Image (cartoon, rainbow, N blue to C red):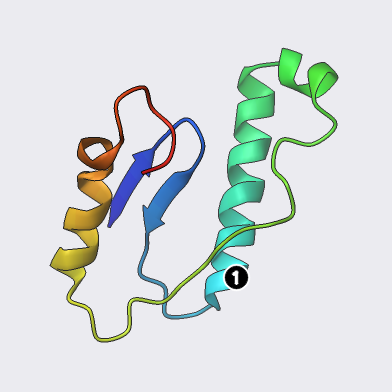
Amino acid sequence: MALEVMPDRELLFVKSRKSSPSYAATQFKGFNSHHLRAEFARLRSQLPTLWSRSSFVATAGAVPAETVQRYIQTQYERLPKGGGRP
């Protein structure tokens, strides 16, 4: 539903009815790793693994989808000058 790719993290807002949030994150990371390594062969030799095993997954609960989407889409606006985490 929304995606923001930043230098130190990716924010992804998805709707999934058939799997747990952690399973969806694992599948996303595996799919992207496979396709990035196929497209950029140097990744296979330079990195033993593309993603760490860790991830942060949270559910939106009673928060409206529009609020989560707005949060994700405005990430760059909240970054301090010089980059890094807010």
The spot of residue 49 in percent (x, y) is 79, 36
In this rendering, the answer to whether 14 lies above or below 4 is below
Q: Position of residue 69 (x, y in %)?
A: 21, 58
Q: Position of residue 20 (x, y in %)?
A: 55, 78
- Percent of width and height locating residue 9: 49, 42
Q: Secondary structure at mark 1?
A: helix
The residue lying at 73 percent from left, 47 percent from top is: 52
Residue at image point 40% right, 53% down: 12
Residue type at numbered disc 1: Ser
User: How many discs mark residues in the rendered view?
Assistant: 1
- Position above or below: 85 against 60: above
Residue bearing mark 1:
22
Q: Residue at x 72, y 15 (%)?
A: 41
Quadrant location of the N terminus in the rendered image = bottom left
For the C terminus, which image quadrant? Answer: top left
Asked which quadrant contains residue 42, the reply is top right
Residue at 42%, 73% (x, y): give it: 16
Q: Is residue 79 left or right of residue 56?
A: left
Determine crowd level at label 1: few under 14, some 14-19, many 20+ residues with C-alpha closer than 10 A: few
- The reply, left or right, for residue 84 in relation to residue 81 is right
In the image, residue 62 sits, relative to residue 57, either above or below, namely: below
Of 38 and 47, nearer the camera is: 47
